[in-house]
Image: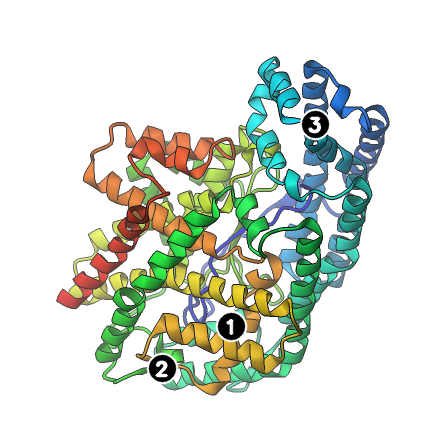
Amino acid sequence: MTEKRPFSYKEYLDTSMPMTIQPSWDLPCWNLKDFYLSPRDPLLQSDLDFSTTAALTFASSTEGKVAGLSAADLGAALITYEMIQERLLKISSYAYLLFAEDMTHKDHAGFFQDMKEKVTDISQNLLFFTLEMNDMDDATLETLIKSDATLKRYAPWINQVRAFKPYQLSKDLEKMLHDKDIGARANWVRLYDETFANLRFPLEGDSLPISEILNRLSDPDPKRREGAAKTFAAELEKQSTLMALITNTLAKDKDITDRWRHYPSSVTARHLDNQVEEDVVDALVSSVKNAYPRLSHRYYALKAQWLGKKTLPYWDRNAPLPDENPRLIPWDEAKTTVLEAYGTFSPQLKTMGQQFFDHHWIDATLNPGKDSGAFSHPTVPSVHPYILMNYHGKTRDVMTLAHELGHGIHQCLAGNQGLLLSETPLTIAETASVFGEMLTFQAILNRETDPKRRKAILAGKVEDMLNTVVRQIAFFDFERHVHHKRKEKELTVEELGTLWMQVQKESLGPSIDLFPEYQYYWSYISHFIHAPFYVYAYAFGDCLVNSLYAVYSEGTILNFEEKYIDLLKAGGIKRHADLVAPFGLDTRTPAFWDKGLLMIERFIDELEKI
């Protein structure tokens, strides 16, 4: 509970970054003083001291007694538990955000590690609470919940905790695993992050950080794209032995934990955490893979024609169109575009979005050492979310802003549920972000009158959707292969590259040429390291929103805006099927996923007509 990953934007492979042009406009930098004035702020030490005392007091008064508590006392204990967890998560969030600002800053990296260790030590005293709650029999706990208002309110969180009951270990083993992570898995992840943050790529006389080399992959000049792609691959190859070691170590670590917990598969824990049934995910994966020929294969064949080629080298997959005349979009224009798109749908959402700009909750600067991706970190309800991105001024960056702002607004609305009930499963967490992207895309498309620009905007959207749906399912496929094979043996760099090339060829189709050096590109997809099997949530969220937006466009649901905001406010108190039921949708049927994929097909149909 004390380690919460931010909702990170989809990690487009070879994409999402525009030309390498340093914008002249001022970009916002976040203000983290809503947490603490600095790492040396006395309030931070005070919070650590308070949490230490509170956790020890809680343990001494409650440990070993949970099963015998009255309904009122159990409810009171739950509130105390939540209060301590929120204070610890506030500290963790602040340390992580400082680290994300500059992963090469030794003081920030050291502070982040120090806080993780301190928080882990303190939270060790809280582990007993959920373990003992899971030891209670169902009938007893159900009776207690029915008799107490506090327990009734927290029932969704209690039920989610108890979903892991069959896989729970003894108290001592759980404490050992909790302690071990900070010195084992967490440090392998840190090694991965710091390695990539420190990498520099030599190109055209420059020494570029990872965000800048990725910029060149969507440069209008095909020679510059090729040069960037091959330089990137060459450096990845140099790091491949280390990346393979990190990947193998973390996969084996997960396998050991999964075996001790008796999980049926390596994906079980993620499904439980996402509050989604395995057959629902299987239906999603099957629908997307069946649609590969109609989606990615078809689109890339079209794009090859537009570029005057029979097939596309992989570095041309996200190339600008030949007649596209991209312009840099100033930050203030991006801000206005996104807020107006949100406001057209809901004035309330626009007002909530405005505060992210007014109060400096966004960092869009371009700094070496900064996290090269984008995310919205929910932090804690008593503070507010923070958004990190790298804004270069292209349409895709405007979409990134719309995406992360959707996350931030969602997190603010759900935050009213309190810490334990506000955490939204990944499968639903992408709803507001992708819906916000769609609102912004439609606003940009509708005001564009130039046919060439409309084609470029529509093509960009299709590519983003393919990256969100097709690519993420291919990533999920790759992870499943890796974790399955790692149960038997350590995978070599060559074996990892072979698996990667197989799933990429299947998903991208015959119109994309994957040159041999592409086999190393798996190594920079950080979700594989940070959160195994996270990636299918993107496809889940995109298809869900496509279906949701189709219903919105049809105008068949009364009070759609109100019901949509209620969905966001729910946080973690409802499961996916219950959340979309008011819109006449059912995630358990293949037709639901086909409806979402149909929107991508229709966009490709429109491009063919253009």
Q: Name the residue under label 2.
A: 221
Residue 168 x, y percent position in the rendering: 70, 42
Front label number (3 vs 2):
3
- Dividing the picture into quadrants, the one containing residue 244 is bottom right
Q: Is residue 309 visible?
A: yes
- Dividing the picture into quadrants, the one containing residue 110 is bottom right
Q: In this view, does 473 lie to the left or right of 232?
A: left
Image quarter in which the N terminus is found: top right
In front of the other: 532 or 607: 532
Query: Disc 3 on helix, strand or loop?
Result: loop
What's the residue at 25%, 85% (across, down)? 310
Which residue type does callout 3 highlight?
Met
Which residue type does callout 2 highlight?
Asp
Query: Disc 2 on helix, strand or loop?
Result: loop
Q: In this view, does 62 lie to the left or right of 351?
A: right
Above/below status of 379 relative to 238: above
Q: Can residue 329 be seen in this view?
A: no
What's the residue at 61%, 77% (across, down)? 200
What's the residue at 76%, 60% (across, down)? 184
